[in-house]
Image (tube, rainbow, N blue to C red):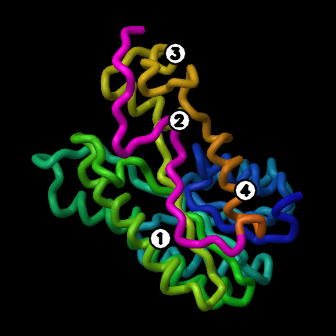
């Protein structure tokens, strides 16, 4: 088991990529602190995994919640080895519809909360020579027109990852970052329905966006995360890994008609 005896806190872990990472980390021997807004679902996942799992409910736009998550982790397990900042508010907005309140909320959840969580956890991560894995998005590089505020927040999160990897290098705390591409989660399925796509849209994704034949699954992201949460990736820090089926930057795919 590659994560045996580690204590890992995963935000936004009651669905999608966060849930997949929590489940895979538990299977690899870690004790898990789950987090989410849906208490019923969180408790159900905790019961399904093992006695070494604790669930904490909380809204990450509340600046007190990150410290509460860390305190609960220490109270439950006595140590903290890794944080996965996965939770994010994925909200549709463009230049016209992004008002101050929406922008601030996106930044609070997607950037401020990870910063505050790392800040609160740092004394414990120093003791364990632990690590942080921030789950970002390919939208950090430019983003889609209807994901303006979200894309800006993911660009900021990427800078946070690189900055802290540099700042914390002498403390033995590693910070790495995933820029995740198009992943078929339950939430993404619903988002695309709201965007007007048909119910079978995952089966009709053009090969330009899914050259393997299908979109990535949360479990595939979780499998990649295990390496970066384990001691196998030590001492690497400050890496930004594009977790996608094709290169984003400079991409010029062959022109073809499917």
Q: Nearer the viewer, residue 85 or 226?
A: 226
Q: Nearer the viewer, mark 3 or mark 2?
A: 2
Q: Nearer the viewer, mark 1 or mark 3?
A: 1
Residue at image mark 4: 226
Q: Are marks 1 and 4 in contact (CB under 8 Å)?
A: no
Residue at image mark 2: 245
Going 24% across and 57% down the picture, which residue do you hit?
102
Secondary structure of the residue carrying tag 4 is: helix
Instruction: List x then y, in percent, for residue 179.
Output: 47, 52
Q: Is residue 212 part of the magenta span, yes or no? A: no
For label 2, the crowd category at 10 Å Cα-Cα, with few meaning under 14, some 14 to 19 and many 20 or more, is some
Q: Nearer the viewer, mark 4 or mark 3?
A: 4
Residue farthest left in this picture: 96
**Disc 2 to disc 1, how far (Cα)?**
22 Å
**Sequence-first tag of 2 and 4:** 4
Q: Is residue 255 part of the magenta span, yes or no? A: yes
Secondary structure of the residue carrying tag 2 is: loop
**Disc 4 to disc 3, how far (Cα)?**
28 Å
């Amino acid at each position: 088991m590659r994560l045996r005896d580690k204590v890992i806190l995963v935000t936004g872990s009651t669905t999608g990529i966060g849930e997949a990472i929590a489940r895979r980390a538990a299977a690899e021997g870690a004790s898990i602190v789950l987090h989410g807004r849906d208490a019923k679902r969180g408790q159900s996942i905790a019961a399904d995994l093992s006695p070494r799992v604790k669930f904490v409910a909380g809204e990450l736009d509340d600046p007190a919640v990150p410290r509460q998550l860390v305190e609960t982790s220490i109270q439950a397990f006595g140590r903290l080895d890794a944080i996965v900042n996965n939770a994010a508010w994925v909200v549709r907005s463009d230049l016209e519809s992004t008002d101050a309140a929406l922008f601030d909320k996106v930044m609070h959840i997607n950037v401020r909360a990870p910063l505050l969580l790392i800040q609160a956890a740092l004394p414990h991560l120093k003791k364990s020579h632990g690590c942080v894995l921030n789950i970002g998005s390919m939208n950090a590089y430019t983003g889609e027109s209807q994901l303006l505020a979200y894309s800006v927040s993911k660009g900021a999160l990427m800078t946070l990852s690189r900055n802290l990897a540099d700042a914390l290098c002498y403390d033995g705390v590693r910070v790495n970052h995933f820029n995740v591409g198009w992943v078929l989660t339950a939430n993404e399925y619903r988002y695309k329905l709201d965007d007007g796509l048909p119910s079978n849209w995952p089966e009709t994704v053009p090969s330009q966006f899914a050259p393997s034949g299908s979109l990535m699954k949360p479990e595939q992201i979780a499998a990649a995360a295990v390496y970066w949460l384990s001691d196998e990736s030590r001492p690497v820090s400050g890496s930004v890994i594009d977790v996608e089926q094709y290169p984003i930057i400079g991409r010029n795919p062959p022109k073809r008609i499917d």
